[in-house]
Image (cartoon, rainbow, N blue to C red):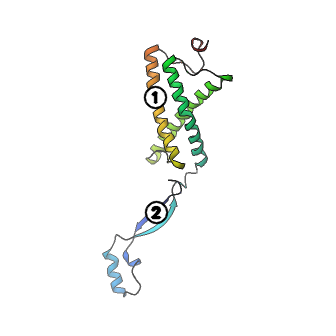
Amino acid sequence: MEGATMLLLSPISSCNVRSKHLNYSLRRRSCYSSPRALKIVSMAKEGSDTGNGVVEKAAIAGGLISTPVIAWSLYTLKTTGCGLPPGPGGSIGALEGVSYLVVVGIVGWSLYTKAKTGSGLPNGPFGLLGAVEGFSYLALVAIVVVFGLQFLDKGYIPGPLPADQCFG
């Protein structure tokens, strides 16, 4: 939730919140009778210490482009036994390779954040970073499954460069 605030609360004695019209002895006794009173220590903007606004937006854009490209690549690999064609000037093949790197990078960032903070990536604007994180994990599972099936069926996984048997 971008822009949300987080309240930090601290227990205090209730004598700090009692009226000043009570006499001293009554206030002193009431200080010990209600230890559950809370006071606001500070208010901090959630995620204000991360400073990853540009990185988060780049990960969102990269993830939203990369996951469909990987789905297309995995479908092509499963149906033809080869990856995507190089395309004009090698642009489609380059997009395919960069997409795999982006997904691995997002999953790596997520795992690092999980190990460091105990939770995954923040939701980001409109929940898109959380969605990209989830799609990246799904893409990683699909990569492992399709590559495993490719290896079982064909006995190899195509390398990063176009093979002669695919596009020769």
Q: What element carries label 1?
A: helix
Apparent side of residue 118 relative to residue 162 in the rendered image (left or right): left
Apparent side of residue 137 relative to residue 53 in the rendered image (left or right): left
Identify which residue is drawn at 47% across, 39% down.
Answer: 134
Tell me where residue 108 appears, x and y as whole percent.
50, 37
Up the image or down, 7 lies above or below 17; here it is above
Tell me where residue 114 appears, x and y as whole percent.
45, 44
Q: Which of marks 2 and 1 is nearer the N terminus?
A: 2
Q: Is any atom of residue 144 visible in this view?
A: yes
Q: What element carries label 2?
A: strand
Apparent side of residue 5 relative to residue 167 in the rendered image (left or right): left
Q: Is any atom of residue 124 visible in this view?
A: no
Instruction: Please identify, in this view, whether the residue under mark 2 or under mark 1 is nearer the observer.
Output: 1
Q: Residue 142 carries which label?
A: 1
Location of residue 30 by image quarter: bottom left
Identify which residue, 62 or 19, lies in the foreground.
62
* Amino acid at circle 2: Leu
* Amino acid at circle 1: Ala
Tell me where residue 165 appears, x and y as whole percent.
57, 11
Q: Which mark is residue 7?
A: 2
Identify which residue is drawn at 50% across, 64% down.
Answer: 43
Identify which residue, 43 or 112, lies in the foreground.
43
Q: Which mark is residue 92?
A: none
Identify which residue, 57 or 44, lies in the foreground.
57
